[in-house]
Image (cartoon, helix red, strand yellow):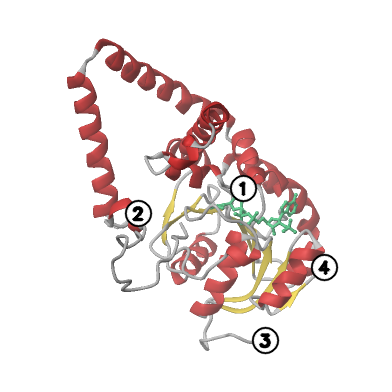
């Protein structure tokens, strides 16, 4: 083993199934924080497993999920939610009594439904969702600071083992996250509006603009700084992950979509009627929400998300101009 930075790690052996953005970030953060004694990782494809060996963020890389979870104290499944049940069925018989099994899926009720039946008695199943991410995927995209100051939501089962939940909470806190518990159903409703619907809107608007773009040629790209660019970042998110999110959080997303459509109709009517007062009042309220998010430290106050701007033509270059990497 290497990379262990404390004598008293919270967790002995951490097994990671799935080593993309989230699994890879957990590994890096767990090692950097000294929260675990050792990390065993695996991924579906030989190519990803080979890359994990090259990147070196796990102490051991196994070929199968069953091998990875053997003797593990904490197992975290970090794969698209649609595959959760299949993986739970595979690892169930190999879990150590007293182990904690968790996940990171963006939907919780379906994960509980799909995984819980395969978790044996004596193993603590505590689903989780770190509300942190980027539009990138794969083992190279992870980084240790991803969870710092971000929320991680735990959805423990009723009458579950409190000590196990406390341990998982302490693990996420060691990675820099703030932890809250709620029911899976409440999680799915909250995330439908804060995350799933915004992604659906981004996917829609970028697709619509692209169809228009074929008419207006490069104008959509040339003038994309005016708001559209921020949607393109979200719309670049992983297609498999987001397909699974919408398939597995269908009811909550449809409920929020109904409310959204009503509000959109109100704004449409205000524009049609030239009701400037209604538009101004609405935009003032939404501006206050953005400011609130900055005030509670969930985003930077830097304008334009802190993007760097190119120097004036002919001006001395104070620092090399770098494209932003948001
Ligand atoms: P990712 O970077 O695409 O990595 C996905 C991992 O899952 C890879 O190791 C992949 O293996 C493996 N995998 C894919 N399909 C699989 C299958 N059918 N069976 C078994 N393994 C499979 O994805 P991610 O962003 O880390 O997302 C993982 C989970 O985190 C998802 O449930 C997502 O909802 C949740 N999440 C994501 C974000 C975000 O912003 N990305 C934020 C919070 C939570 P191969 O590389 O070998 O294909």
Q: CA distance from mark 2 to mark 1?
A: 21 Å
Can residue 309 be seen at all in this image of the molecule?
Answer: yes
The label number, if any, that marks residue 212 in the structure image: none
Crowd band around label 4 with a 10 angstrom C-alpha radius: few (<14), some (14–19), many (20+): some
- The picture quadrant for ligand 1 comes to bottom right
Q: Which residue is mark 3?
A: 1
Question: Could you say where residue 226 lies in the image, as x and y percent from the top left?
Answer: 37, 40
Q: Which residue is mark 1?
A: 238
Q: Which residue is mark 4?
A: 63
Whether pointer 2 and pointer 4 mark residues with C-beta atoms closer than 8 Å, the reply is: no
Q: CA distance from mark 2 to mark 4?
A: 40 Å
Q: Earlier in the sequence, mark 3 or mark 1?
A: 3
Q: Nearer the viewer, mark 4 or mark 1?
A: 1
Question: Could you say where residue 120 lies in the image, as x and y percent from the top left?
Answer: 73, 55
- As drawn, 10 above or below 18: below
Question: Could you say where residue 18 lies in the image, as x and y percent from the top left?
Answer: 69, 60
Q: Earlier in the sequence, mark 4 or mark 1?
A: 4
Can residue 195 be seen at all in this image of the molecule?
Answer: no
Question: Residue at left 43%, top 39%?
Answer: 228
Question: Residue at left 31%, top 73%?
Answer: 318
Q: Earlier in the sequence, mark 3 or mark 2?
A: 3
- As drawn, 24 above or below 198: below
Left or right of 124, for residue 51? right
Left or right of 102, for residue 117? right
Question: Could you say where residue 150 lies in the image, as x and y percent from the top left?
Answer: 41, 58
Q: Which residue is mark 2?
A: 305
Q: Nearer the viewer, mark 2 or mark 4?
A: 2
């Amino acid at each position: 083993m290497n990379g262990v930075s404390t004598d008293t790690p919270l967790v002995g052996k951490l097994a990671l199934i799935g080593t993309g953005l989230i699994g890879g970030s957990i590994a890096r953060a767990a090692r950097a924080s000294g929260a675990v004694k050792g990390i065993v990782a695996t991924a579906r494809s030989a190519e990803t497993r080979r890359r994990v060996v090259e990147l070196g963020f796990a102490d051991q890389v196994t070929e199968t999920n069953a091998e990875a979870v053997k003797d593990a104290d904490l197992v975290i499944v970090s794969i698209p939610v649609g595959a959760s049940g299949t993986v739970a069925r595979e690892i169930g018989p190999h879990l150590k009594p007293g182990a904690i099994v968790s996940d990171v899926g963006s939907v919780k009720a379906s994960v509980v439904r799909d995984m819980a039946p395969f978790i044996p008695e004596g193993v603590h199943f505590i689903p989780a969702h770190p509300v942190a991410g980027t539009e990138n995927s794969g083992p190279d995209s992870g980084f240790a600071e991803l969870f710092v100051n971000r929320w991680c939501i735990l959805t423990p089962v009723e009458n579950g083992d409190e000590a196990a939940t406390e341990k998982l909470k302490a693990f996420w806190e060691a990675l820099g996250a703030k932890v809250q518990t709620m029911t899976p159903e409440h999680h799915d409703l909250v995330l439908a509006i804060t995350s799933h619907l915004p992604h659906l809107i981004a996917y829609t608007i970028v697709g619509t603009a692209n169809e228009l773009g074929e008419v207006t040629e490069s104008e959509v790209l040339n003038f994309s700084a005016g708001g559209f660019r921020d949607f393109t970042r979200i719309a670049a998110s992983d297609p498999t992950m987001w397909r699974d999110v919408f398939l597995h959080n269908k009811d909550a997303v449809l409920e929020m979509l109904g409310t959204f459509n009503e509000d959109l109709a109100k704004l449409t009517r205000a524009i049609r009627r030239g009701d400037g007062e209604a538009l101004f009042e609405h935009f003032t309220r939404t501006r206050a929400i953005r400011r609130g998010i900055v005030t509670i430290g969930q985003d930077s106050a830097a304008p334009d998300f802190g993007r760097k701007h190119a120097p004036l033509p002919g001006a001395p270059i104070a620092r090399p101009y770098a494209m932003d990497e948001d």
